[in-house]
């Protein structure tokens, strides 16, 4: 029972600052780069209106109904909602083993029940399509932190069962629909492989992989994710259609170029600006704001003086 009492020392403010500093600097730079490319070569991607670009800066463009600058950023809206749920239901009271497990169990039940409601608001809040993947990740993190436990593996198993169902339902269509054929067995295999890979890390099976380049590769995943789609298509358009480069060299040059750009964003944006943004958000604020303001003696309210008269 000792592990149940363990508590994280991070406050709600710490959690908020870490997420903002991690997500926004590279995201803002990617918005500017993709928008500039769209203005320069609109035949690949049409630039959004100025008001939509400004809304995109908030990362709240989807609920606002604005066009996305980055095609991949729909997942960031999902991530933001998860952070909000976890912060309001767990972090605000203090992160403990028991609270995370309770949160995972209640969220799983809510996600299943939510499918019967047909309510758009509860769908947005509970996220039944994505909840199993977050919940499975939370349980695997607890396994990594505190060791294997039948309850935790049960949460992982239920999350995998629900997750593969959600993925198959969302990606597979019977007959000739969609941009390419998606086999339901392949979808289930991909979801299973993803869970198995994270489980291997949680169990410590990858501890021998201590190559230094893995740290850099991990750091590049987020900026590469942000820029690879639209800017990748721009590079392909220029190299293949514009300069006539064959397909395979075009692919190699595009991947290398996106990795190089991701490294530049990490090195010159994330590393210097992330800590500065976190520090700026941590500037001390008054804990209590007095309800009364100090007034000059000659500015005493008339009613108070009249009462003494």
Image (cartoon, helix red, strand yellow):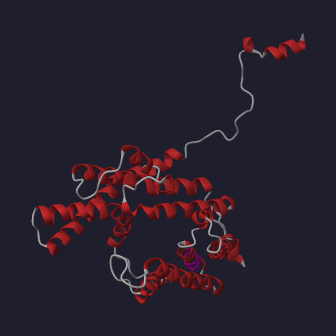
Quadrant location, the N terminus: bottom right
Q: Is residue 222 left or right of residue 249?
A: right
Quadrant location, the C terminus: top right
Which region of the structure is painted magenta?
Answer: 138-143
Residue 11 location (% of width, % of height) = 62, 56
Q: Residue at x 38, y 80 (%)?
A: 209
Q: Is residue 210 above or below residue 35?
A: below
Residue 52 location (% of width, % of height) = 41, 48
Q: Residue at x 51, y 55 (%)?
A: 63
Q: Is residue 244 left or right of residue 82?
A: left
Residue 249 location (% of width, % of height) = 15, 72
Q: Is residue 108 above or below residue 56?
A: below
- Can you name the residue that lies furthest to the left here? 244
Residue 236 location (% of width, % of height) = 20, 65
Q: Residue at x 70, y 36 (%)?
A: 289
Which quarter of the picture shows residue 97?
bottom right
Q: Is residue 111 above or below residue 302?
A: below
Which quarter of the picture shows residue 119?
bottom right
Determine if the magenta segment contains residue 116.
no
Q: Is residue 56 above or below residue 119?
A: above
**Main secondary structure of the magenta stretch:** helix
Q: Is residue 224 left or right of residue 113?
A: left
Q: Nearer the viewer, residue 49 or 149?
A: 49
Count of residue discs: 0
Q: Nearer the viewer, residue 156 or 122?
A: 122
Which quarter of the picture shows residue 74?
bottom left
Q: Nearer the viewer, residue 226 or 297?
A: 226
């Amino acid at each position: 029972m000792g592990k149940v009492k363990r508590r994280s020392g991070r406050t709600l403010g710490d959690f908020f600052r870490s997420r903002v500093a991690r997500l926004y600097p590279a995201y803002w730079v990617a918005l500017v780069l993709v928008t500039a490319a769209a203005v320069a070569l609109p035949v690949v991607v049409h630039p959004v209106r100025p008001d939509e670009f400004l809304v995109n800066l908030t990362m709240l463009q989807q609920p606002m109904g604005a066009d996305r600058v980055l095609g991949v950023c729909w997942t960031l809206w999902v991530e933001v909602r998860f952070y909000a749920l976890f912060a309001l239901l767990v972090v605000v009271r203090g992160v403990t083993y028991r609270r995370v497990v309770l949160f995972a169990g209640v969220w799983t039940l809510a996600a299943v029940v939510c499918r019967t409601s047909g309510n758009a608001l509860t769908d947005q809040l509970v996220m039944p399509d994505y909840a199993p993947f977050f919940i499975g990740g939370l349980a695997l993190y607890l396994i990594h932190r505190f060791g294997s436990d039948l309850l935790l593996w049960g949460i992982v198993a239920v999350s995998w069962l629900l997750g593969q169902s959600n993925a198959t339902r969302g990606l597979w269509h019977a007959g000739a629909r969609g941009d390419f054929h998606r086999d339901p067995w392949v979808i289930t295999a991909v979801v299973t492989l993803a869970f198995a890979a994270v489980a291997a890390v949680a169990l410590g099976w990858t501890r021998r992989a201590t190559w230094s380049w893995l740290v850099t590769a991990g750091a590049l995943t987020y900026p590469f994710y942000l820029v690879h789609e639209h800017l990748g298509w721009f590079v392909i358009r220029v190299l293949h259609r514009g300069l006539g480069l064959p397909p395979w060299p075009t692919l190699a040059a595009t991947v290398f170029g996106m990795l190089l750009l991701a490294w530049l964003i990490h090195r010159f944006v994330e590393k210097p600006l992330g800590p500065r943004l976190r520090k700026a958000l941590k500037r001390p604020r008054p804990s209590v704001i007095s309800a009364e303001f100090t007034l000059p003696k000659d500015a005493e309210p008339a009613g108070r003086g009249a009462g003494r008269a």
